[in-house]
Image (tube, helix red, strand yellow):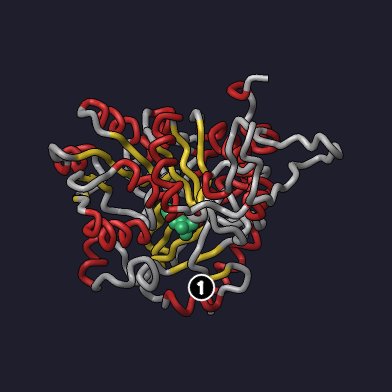
Amino acid sequence: MSEKKLGVNTICTHVGEIKDKQFKGAVSPMYLSSSYEFLDVDVKRYPRYFNTPNQEYLSKKIAALEGTETAMIFGSGMAAISHMFLAFLSKGDHLVVQNTLYGGTVNFIKEEFPKYGIEYTFTNGYEVKDFEAAIQSNTKLIHIETPSNPLLTITNIKAIAELAKSKGILTSIDNTFASPINQNPASYGIDMVMHSATKYFGGHSDICAGAVASSKEHMDRIWNVSKNLGGSLSDMTVWMLERSMKTLGLRVKAQTKSALKLAKWLNKHPKVSKVYYPGLKSHPEYKLAKAQMKGFGAMLSFELDKSLDSETFQKALKLIKSSMSLAGIESTVISPHLTSHALLTQEERNAVGISDQLIRFSVGIENLKDLKKDIEQAMNA
Ligand SMILES: *Cc1c(COP(=O)(O)O)cnc(C)c1O
C-alpha cells in the first residue's frame, strides 16, 4: 500500500510499525540493544547514530505525517532545533529568525550563537516584508514559528518559502503548535519541519522528545552534526512515543474542535476582554490561517477583564491545571508574563502585547461543558 494514499489516522496507527516476526505480537517490539553486530551488516546500528530499529521506524511515521522523505527523533525539542541550526549555520553565517518565538529557542540563539560566530537577526514583525528586510548576503537560513506563542500570530508559510528560495536560502519552521494534523509546511516548500515531541506527539505530559522532518539530503547534513552532539532519545521513550502517536490524529482533532468552540464562547464572555485564536473571524490572519492550516489548532490565549486578578483566577481553577507545558490531553493554562516572558520588563512586554491579564490556554480532551463550568466558577471566585 502506498503510504501517500493512507488517511492520517491510519498513518498514526500503522506506518513505521516493526513487525514482530518471532512472536507475532500486535505492537512493535522494543529493541533496547545499544550494541549491534558490526561485521557483515548493511546498517551499523548504534543509539547515538539515531538508527536503532525503534528510532528508524518511528521516524517513518513522522515523515509520513509531514509528507517528507525522512525524519529524525531527538532527546528533546531543543535538541532537534539546536542540531538543525548547527547543521546549516557555521561561523560567519547569518540566521533570520521570527521575533515571536519559543523562549528556549531565543535563549539558544542569544547564548550559544556568539560562541560559534554565527550571526542572527530577529525580525521586527511576522509579515513577509519583515523577513525580507532582515536578509543579508550571508543569510543561510530563515526560521519561522506559526501559530506563534502566546498570541497565535500566523506567518505566511508559502510566501516565506518562496522568498527564501528566490535567494537560495533554506527555511525551517517550528511546527509544534499546529502539529502535523493541522499543518504540513513541507507541502508549501519549507525545507525543515521541527517539532517538540514533548507536546502533541507525546500528548500525555510524560515524554520529552523532539523531531525534524525533511528531505534525505538535508537530514544527512543534520545527522552529520547530530552524531557528534549526541542528542538521541532512549529507545524505551521512542517506543512510548510510538504508542502515543497512534492517537495523535484523534487527540488533536478533538482538541482543535473544542478549542474553536471555547474561543467563540470566551469571545462573547463579559469577563474576557480579548481572545487570540486563528479560527476566529476577528483574528487579523484568519483567512491566511484558513488557507494554510487544516485546522486552527488547540492553543488559544485570552485576556481576562481588568476586574479579575489573573493569578487568583488560575488558582481557583479546579479541573484545568496551571502548567508550564502544553499540548497534553489535559487542559492547562499559564500566564506568559510569569513564564515565557518573565525576563522582559513591563515595557518590553507591553510592546509585544503580553499583558498581565493574558492567559494561554492549551485545550485538552475534557468535555466542553466541564471546561466552561470550571472557567465560570474560577471567574466568580
Ligand atoms: C516546548 C517547545 C519547544 C522545546 O521543546 P522541548 O521538548 O521542551 O525541548 C520548542 N518549540 C515550541 C513551540 C515548544 O512549545
Residue 303 shows up from this direction: yes
Query: Where is residue 228 shown, x and y percent of the image?
Result: 42, 50
Please tell me whether residue 169 is drawn above or below residue 331 in the rendered image: above
Q: In which quarter of the image is residue 246?
A: top right
Ligand 1 shows up in the quarter that is bottom left
Q: Which amino acid does label 1 sit on?
A: Met
Please tell me whether residue 237 is drawn above or below residue 305 in the rendered image: above
Q: Quadrant of residue 57?
A: top right
Relative to residue 227, is residue 343 drawn left or right? Answer: left
Relative to residue 288, is residue 244 drawn left or right? Answer: right
Camera-side residue: 13 or 371? 13
What residue is shown at x 57% (from left), y 73% (from top)? 317
Query: Where is residue 256 shown, x and y percent of the image?
Result: 55, 46
Please tell me whether residue 222 is drawn above or below residue 231 in the rendered image: above
Query: Where is residue 9 shown, x and y percent of the image?
Result: 66, 35
- Report which residue position mark 1 lands on: 379
